Image (spheres, rainbow, N blue to C red):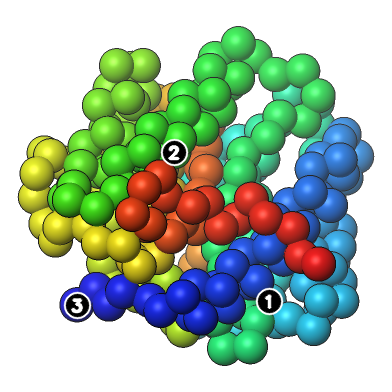
Amino acid sequence: MIRSKTAEEISRIRAACAIVHRVQQELKPLLVPGSTTRSLDSVAESVIRGHQATPAFKGYRGFPATICASVNAQIVHGVPDDRKLQAGDIVSIDVGVRLNGYYGDGAFTAAVGPVSAEAQRLIDVTRSCLDLAIQQARPGNRLSDISHTVETQATAARLSVVRQFGGHGIGRELHEPPHINNYGPPGRGPRLQAGFVLAIEPILSLGRPEMRTGTDGWTTTTADGLPAAHFEHTIAITHGTAEILTLSSPP
C-alpha cells in the first residue's frame, strides 16, 4: 500500500536526497580516462559520511560498496573495481543515502570523454524518458502513466526497456511500495496523490532487453553486450509540478 508522506517526512527525505545530489556533483568531474570505479566509490563514501549520513547501499542485502557503478554493457548493480575507465566508456552511477532514518536515491549515466553517437543517443533518450515520466507524476494520474511514458519514448527511439528493474517508493525504507514498471499501458494502478514520494528510474538498452547476472551475484549485463543507461530521481508529488528532491544541495 502506498502511503502519503507528511511535510516533515518529505523534508527529511529531501535532506537525504541533497546529499545524493552532492555526491553526484563530486563524482561527475572524476569520470575521466584512468579513473577506477573503486576510487569513485571511496570518494562517494567520504562525502556521505562527511555529511553525517550513511551509504544506503553498503551492506544492503549484502551489497559490498557505497555506489553501484555500471560500465558500458553493465546495466545496474555494478560492483566498483580497479578496472580503469577508458575514453568512449559510458558509466551509470547509482547513489543511495540514509540520513536520520530516511532515504534518498538517485542515478545518472555519463560519458567518459567522447563517445559514439549511438551511446550518446542512449544517454540522451534515457534522460529524456526520466524527465517526461516525472511530468506524469501529478495528482489524478495513474501509476502506470509513468510507466507508459517511459516505454513510449524508448520505443519511439528504437531502444529497449530492461524490464527486470524499475522505480519504487522511498522513505523510511530504501524500497517501499509501489514498484514502478518502465513499461505497460496507461491508466492502470493506484491514482497518484500529493505526498507520494517515488524514485523513478528508466533503464534502457541500445540493443536487446535480455540480461544476465555476473558471478559476483550483483552486476547485471546485457546479454548482447550492447550498452545500457540508467537515470533516477527521487520526487515528491505535490498539488502542481512534482518536486525533484535529488536536485537540491545540502546546506
Task: Please say if 100 is above or below 240.
Answer: below
Of the two numbered discs 1 and 2 in the rendering, the one whose residue sits closer to the viewer: 2
Name the amino acid, label 3: Met
Q: Residue furthest right?
A: 34
**Which is more toward the observer, 216 or 17?**
17
Return the mark for residue 130: 2
Query: According to the image, label 1 marks what residue?
Result: 55
When asked about the image quadrant of residue 17, the answer is bottom right
Query: According to the image, label 3 marks what residue?
Result: 1
Task: Please say if 194 is above or below 117.
Answer: below
Q: Is residue 126 left or right of residue 56?
A: left
**Which is more toward the observer, 39 or 174?**
174
Pinpoint residue 159: horizontal percent, then vertical percent: 36, 24
Which secondary structure, mark 3?
Answer: loop
Pinpoint residue 77: horizontal percent, then vertical percent: 54, 59
Residue in the picture at 60% in, 11% down: 117
Which secondary structure, mark 2?
Answer: helix
Which secondary structure, mark 1?
Answer: strand
Residue in the picture at 54% in, 24% down: 124
Query: How many other residues sit within 10 Å of disc 2, few (<14), some (14-19) or many (≥20)?
Result: many
Name the amino acid, label 2: Leu
Pinpoint residue 243: horizontal percent, then vertical percent: 49, 52
